[in-house]
Image: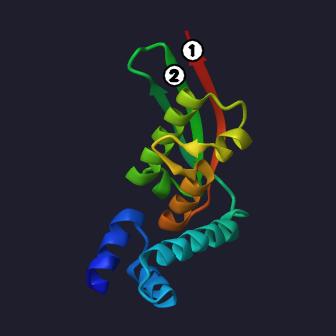
Amino acid sequence: MSDIEKIKKIRETTGLSVGEISKAMREAEGDEAKMLEILKSRGVVIADKKSSREIKEGVIESYIHNTKKVGALLSLGSETDFVARNAEFQKLAHDLAMQVASMCPQNVEELLAQPFIKDPSVTVTDLINQHIAKLGENIRVGQFVRFEI
């Protein structure tokens, strides 16, 4: 696989910029696994830098399981309404509401530490950090509530 094909593949997976991926590729000397680790660690660094930014916008998202017996409401905050309206951000909010409905966390800290239900190789914190790096804004889980009959 050529370097360009690797960059395209990783860009499709992560949504990160070609520049960031190219820089990680040079550091990893073409090793794809090492490159993904470098990009993941950069996402954490980016998230740390943005964590002090004020959350002023966001969405309230719901998830109702197909049995209609379990559901969740979750607020997910962003810095701007531009990101709050973004399809990726809204999908993240929906996935997190589904996570709450299925895994029943008791608080935000427990939710953030859980393996993500759609990809257990990453935690919910990792997932949020990936979106912070991709969207360029601080993202924070607010309140959530789970309902069950």
Q: Does residue 94 lie above or below 57 as drawn?
A: above
Q: Is residue 86 visible?
A: no
Please provide percent x and percent y for residue 28. 49, 85
Q: Residue lying furthest top in this view?
A: 149
Residue count near mark 1 (Cα–Cα under 10 Å), binned few <14, some 14–19, many ≥20: few
Reading the image, the residue beneath label 1 is: 148
Distance from the alpha carbon under mark 2 to that under mark 1: 7 Å
Q: Does residue 16 lie above or below 18 as drawn?
A: above
Mark 2 and mark 1 in contact? Answer it, CB < 8 Å: yes
Task: Look at 66% across and 32% down and name the residue there.
Answer: 105
Please provide percent x and percent y for residue 146. 60, 23
Please provide percent x and percent y for residue 131. 51, 59
Which comes before the other along the chain, label 2 or label 1?
A: 2
As drawn, the label of residue 71 is 2
Residue count near mark 2 (Cα–Cα under 10 Å), binned few <14, some 14–19, many ≥20: many
Task: Look at 51% across and 77% down and name the residue there.
Answer: 34
Q: Secondary structure at mark 1?
A: strand
